[in-house]
Image: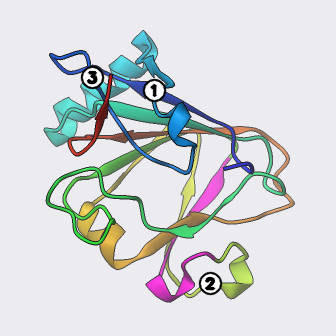
Amino acid sequence: VKSRPKINYGIPNDRGEYGLYRWGQEKRDWGLIEPMPAELLVVVNEIEKRFGVRPNHAIATYYHNGKDQWIPVHSDKAVSPGSKGGVESQTTIFNLSLGATRPFIITKLSCLGKKLRKDLDIVAEFPMQSSDLYALDGGINSRYGHCVPVDGSITDLRVSYVFRCVSKDFVH
């Protein structure tokens, strides 16, 4: 969490509750969800139009450079009731990338926690360029890991917006 500054955004349900995605923050910070800004609602509407699902949660993650901001191999946490073992397997996760191009790498699960390219058993790799939107199917998320590895050669800012349909836990 310290390696990547984040902001939580949400669209409240009819009871005024926001979907809760626990990404390592302290419990006291669960309610720090800001209303989804109009610019991100445009993206939500486009996702709904193209994929038939309407995300109600987004996290903005700031990668100021490739040396200090990265994310190790992981699988995203469960946000839907049908997911098992704490890993999301039922819903699609959408990632909008803005700014510097960074590699999005899919690995074997044996690489969980690794952050250096040399240590990865890579299954697929995609250059996430500015304005690219990637859809990560829940089945892929549960069977493989993914990461944005350490890369000291990247010196420019990248902002990643990850959109989810959270239906498991809520906070008012």
Q: Is 119 located above or below residue 79 in the figure?
A: below
Residues rendered magenta in the picture: 101-113
> Which SS class for mark 1?
loop
Q: Position of residue 109 (x, y in %)?
A: 45, 83
Kind of element beneath mark 2: loop
Query: Circle 1: is it few (<14), some (14-19), or many (20+) Cα within 10 Å?
Result: some
Q: Which residue in the protein does label 2 denote?
A: 120
Identify the disc placed on residue 161. Answer: none
Question: Tags 1 and 3 in contact by the CB under 8 Å rule?
Answer: no
Which of the image's four quarters has the C terminus? top left
In space, the residues marked 1 and 3 are separated at their CA atoms by: 10 Å
Q: How far from the left and from the top, in percent, is residue 47?
A: 27, 34
Q: Which residue appears farthest toward the top when viewing the image?
A: 38
Few, some or many C-alpha atoms within 10 Å of disc 2 (few <14, some 14-19, many ≥20)? Answer: many
Number of numbered discs visible in the structure rendering? 3
Residue depicted at x 70% and y 57%: 70
- Residue under label 3, please give it: 17
- In the image, what residue type sits under mark 2? Leu
**Contact (Cβ within 8 Å) of mark 1 with mark 2:** no
**136 and 127: which is toward the camera:** 136
Residue 104: within the magenta?
A: yes
Residue 108 visible, this orientation:
no
CA neighbours of label 3 inside 10 A, class few (<14), some (14 to 19), many (20+): some
Residue at mark 1: 31
Residue 155 position (above or below residue 70): above
Q: Quadrant of residue 52?
A: top left
Foreground disc of the pair 1, 2? 1
